Image (cartoon, helix red, strand yellow):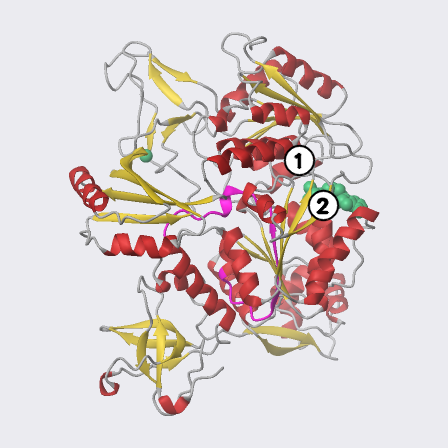
């Protein structure tokens, strides 16, 4: 719908923390349709904005400032704009702050530079060499390529190509500033699907073909071929001329995944994650906006890309907590993806081997469809899972691996297989303690211990990133050589493994010993090529990977996630350990998984050992329903923080006094947050508990709107919180 230009006034949303768009005048000669990207005056500056709708008419026409420029880009699609409005309303964030999430490609709206490319003409140079011949051979297809691309494709140096250009063998042509997006080939045939897979794929394809909103849970055990199956849905969307988005947790966005996409569709998809260069960001953002990028594989922020023709979203590993954004606009990308699909009127597939309780309940209550893949593909069987009772059979003194686990690793190695040890804790040791005075080394800005990272020779705060060298003497009592490392991190496990198996080749995989999500590619390649015998890793290794020779998986501390008492502790521990276990025995050789635990009788361990996910979920659901916790009730987290402790406390008390009375709402707190100090700010928490029918947004607005908090105090609101720290 385009704005009635005779009104000559439009509202423009600016990507700053502003709750509403401002009115601007459209000067004669400019057309500013809804969604257009514009430059407008803002105070004494110029700002980028998006035309959000007709002017509100609230400002005197004569006082309106004119739009300076309308930028040359396809307007932001209506669905993308309605999505921004919806998230702002749901998360209680300023609309401008949400818009900012959609404009994360600075420069994408500037005029695009052209590139010089070359096309072969009929003139051949006087002097021919084998290298020159290769270039000419390559260019015979008459495609226009840059000099660099030509040299690369022909496997020659740049100077060979330059020589040919000087000799007049090529004509110059201009290409758009960015490399094109090769079109995925949806007609290629994928893997030959098993009957169960084919049925699941047909069901997903039918949803896409129908082109109406629906949420579908793709519920299949690890290794059942969920990826192959949802690729069929992607193919269907492509065949119908729609774009598709595959959302993955950032750490699951690996080269292995991109390669699988390429094997199915002939080309790499467009990628979107935090590690992209600015140039690549611009390329993908423009490519999506102009409809040239047909499939995007991305982390949660890819939801905000301006797709004009989106026809399918897949959320892989839908249960992952990484989809929850905690800072700034606090949104859950899986939940918001469902909203995006509903606004766009197309289906969404939520894929997992361990779906979240929220999604399972939605499926049970009929709001979501459910497509199941209960078996591993081919000959592969699900691994056996056994608990090792650390009270009965503890490791040797100063060690962390129980004798049984060590023996199983030895067996695997002797058979030429691989083993993996999983511990969800980075670094060498989580606590450094003084033997003389008992002092524990803490972060000066947070209420947390510093973690020793021995490779980097540093103590690191995992909350704020503070680092310090490991001291020689105790900072409290001054005793020399009295500090001891307590407890294990993955570095310490790798050290122990190297001592026990000096011949074995060990790979340590942790998010902090390499750069970025894709740079672990080399390690993963080495594992696939069987150049590694033992893998030691954090949750980086838990997801998505397929290592055919991996048969033994040991979980060093299965109880770790149960220590924090939040409402999803058991659910998350179950999901994580099930995922880790799922790495074992994915090909012909059966897998064996060992959980080191001090609580083998805990319901999580019992369910894992018995392989009874559904019984676990049922118990978990009953427990939550009894106390009306999500998904049977609603929560809102509120954190009051300030660099001034007294101010934080005072305003938390003020807020407590202003709590509105409402039926079916209880406000707990304020209480010091578990992380009572973070980056030097004192933090207090409230927790709002409401029944499902309550409009918590309206409640929160009534509450927070009644208290005028000074700028030195921050009140952050988290609807549906996942973190309670
Ligand atoms: P999931 O996503 O459910 O864990 P994947 O899609 O990763 O499962 O499949 C596990 C492995 O089995 C992968 O290596 C995949 O290529 C292979 N696979 C799955 N289905 C088929 C099939 N129909 N034909 C051949 N290989 C398959
Ligand atoms: Zn810190």
Residue 140's place in the image compared with 441, above or below, is: below
User: Which residue appears at 25% of the width and 48% of the height?
Assistant: 714
Q: Nearer the viewer, residue 250 or 141?
A: 250
Secondary structure under tag 2 reads: strand
Residue 656's place in the image compared with 611, above or below, is: below
Residue 421 coordinates in the image, percent (x, y): 60, 25
Q: What is the span of residues highlighted in magenta in the rendered image?
A: 304-328
Q: Nearer the viewer, residue 159 or 188?
A: 188
The local crowd at label 1, few if under 14, some if 14 to 19, many if 20 or more residues have their Cα within 10 Å, is few
Image mark for residue 372? 2
Residue 528 image-quadrant placement: top right
In the image, residue 306 lies in the stretch drawn in magenta? yes
Residue 420 in sight from this viewpoint: no
Residue 19 image-quadrant placement: bottom left
Are the residues at dot 1 and dot 2 in contact (C-beta closer than 8 Å)? no
Q: Identify the residue under disc 1.
A: 526
Secondary structure under tag 1 reads: helix
User: Which residue appears at 74% of the width and 53% of the height?
Assistant: 263
Residue 98 coordinates in the image, percent (x, y): 40, 61
């Amino acid at each position: 719908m385009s704005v009635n230009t005779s009104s000559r006034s439009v509202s423009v949303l600016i990507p700053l923390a502003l709750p509403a768009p401002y009115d601007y005048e459209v000067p004669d000669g400019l057309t500013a349709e809804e969604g257009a990207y514009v430059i407008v005056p803002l105070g004494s500056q110029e700002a980028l904005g998006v035309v959000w709708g007709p002017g509100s008419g609230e400002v005197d026409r004569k006082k309106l400032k004119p739009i300076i420029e309308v930028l040359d880009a396809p307007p932001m699609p209506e669905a993308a704009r309605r999505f921004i409005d919806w998230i702002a309303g749901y998360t209680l964030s300023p609309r401008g702050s949400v818009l900012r999430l959609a404009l994360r490609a600075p420069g994408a709206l500037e005029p695009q530079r052209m590139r010089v490319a070359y096309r072969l003409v009929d003139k051949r140079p006087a002097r021919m060499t084998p290298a020159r011949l290769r270039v000419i051979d390559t260019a015979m297809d008459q495609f226009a390529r840059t000099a660099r691309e030509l040299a690369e494709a022909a496997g020659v140096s740049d100077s060979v190509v330059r020589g040919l250009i000087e000799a007049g063998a090529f004509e110059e042509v201009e290409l758009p500033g960015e490399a094109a997006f090769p079109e995925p080939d949806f007609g290629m045939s994928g893997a030959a699907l098993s009957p169960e897979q084919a049925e699941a794929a047909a069901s997903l394809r039918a949803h896409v073909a129908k082109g109406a909103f629906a949420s579908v849970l793709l519920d299949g055990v690890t290794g059942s071929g969920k990826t192959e199956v949802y690729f069929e849905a992607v193919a269907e969307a492509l065949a119908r001329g729609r774009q598709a988005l595959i959302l993955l947790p950032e750490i699951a966005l690996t080269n292995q995944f991109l390669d699988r996409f390429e094997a199915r569709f002939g080309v790499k998809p467009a990628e979107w994650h935090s590690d992209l260069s600015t140039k690549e960001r611009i390329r993908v953002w423009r490519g999506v906006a102009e409809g040239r990028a047909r499939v995007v594989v991305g982390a949660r922020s890819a939801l905000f890309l301006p797709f004009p023709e989106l026809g399918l979203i897949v959320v892989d590993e839908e249960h992952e907590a990484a989809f929850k954004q905690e800072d700034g606009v606090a949104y859950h990308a899986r939940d918001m993806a469902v909203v995006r699909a509903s606004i766009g009127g197309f289906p969404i597939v939520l894929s997992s081997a361990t779906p979240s309780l929220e999604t399972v309940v939605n499926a049970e209550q009929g709001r979501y469809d459910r497509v199941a893949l209960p078996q591993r593909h081919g000959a592969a069987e699900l691994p056996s899972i056994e608990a090792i009772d650390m009270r009965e059979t503890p490791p040797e003194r100063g060690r962390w691996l129980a004798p049984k686990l060590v023996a199983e690793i030895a067996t695997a190695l002797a058979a030429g297989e691989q083993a993996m040890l999983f511990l969800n804790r980075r670094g060498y040791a989580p606590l450094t303690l003084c033997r003389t005075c008992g002092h524990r080394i803490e972060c000066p800005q947070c209420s947390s211990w510093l973690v020793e990272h021995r490779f980097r020779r540093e103590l690191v705060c995992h909350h704020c990133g503070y680092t310090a060298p490991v001291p020689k003497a105790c900072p409290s009592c001054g005793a020399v050589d009295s500090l001891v490392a307590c407890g294990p991190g993955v570095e310490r496990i790798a050290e122990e493994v190297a001592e026990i198996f000096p011949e074995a080749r060990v790979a340590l995989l942790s998010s902090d010993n390499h750069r970025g999500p894709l740079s672990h590619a080399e390690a993963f390649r080495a594992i696939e090529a069987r150049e590694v015998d033992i893998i030691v890793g954090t949750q980086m290794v838990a997801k998505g990977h397929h290592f055919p020779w991996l048969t033994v998986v040991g979980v060093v501390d299965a109880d770790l996630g149960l220590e924090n008492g939040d409402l999803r502790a058991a659910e998350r521990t179950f999901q994580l350990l099930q995922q880790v276990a799922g790495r074992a025995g994915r090909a012909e050789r059966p897998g064996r998984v060992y959980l080191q635990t001090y609580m083998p009788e805990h319901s999580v361990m019992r369910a894992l050992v018995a392989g009874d996910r559904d019984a676990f979920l049922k118990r978990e659901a009953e427990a939550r329903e009894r106390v009306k916790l999500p998904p049977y009730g609603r929560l809102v987290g509120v954190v009051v923080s300030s660099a001034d402790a007294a101010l934080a406390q005072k305003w938390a008390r003020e807020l407590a006094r202003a709590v509105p009375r409402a039926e079916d709402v209880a406000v707990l707190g304020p209480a010091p947050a578990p992380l009572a100090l973070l980056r030097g700010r004192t933090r207090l928490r409230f927790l709002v508990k409401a029944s499902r029918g309550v409009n918590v947004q309206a409640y929160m607005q009534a509450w927070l709107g009644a208290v005028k908090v000074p700028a030195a105090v921050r009140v952050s609101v988290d609807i549906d919180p996942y973190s309670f720290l």
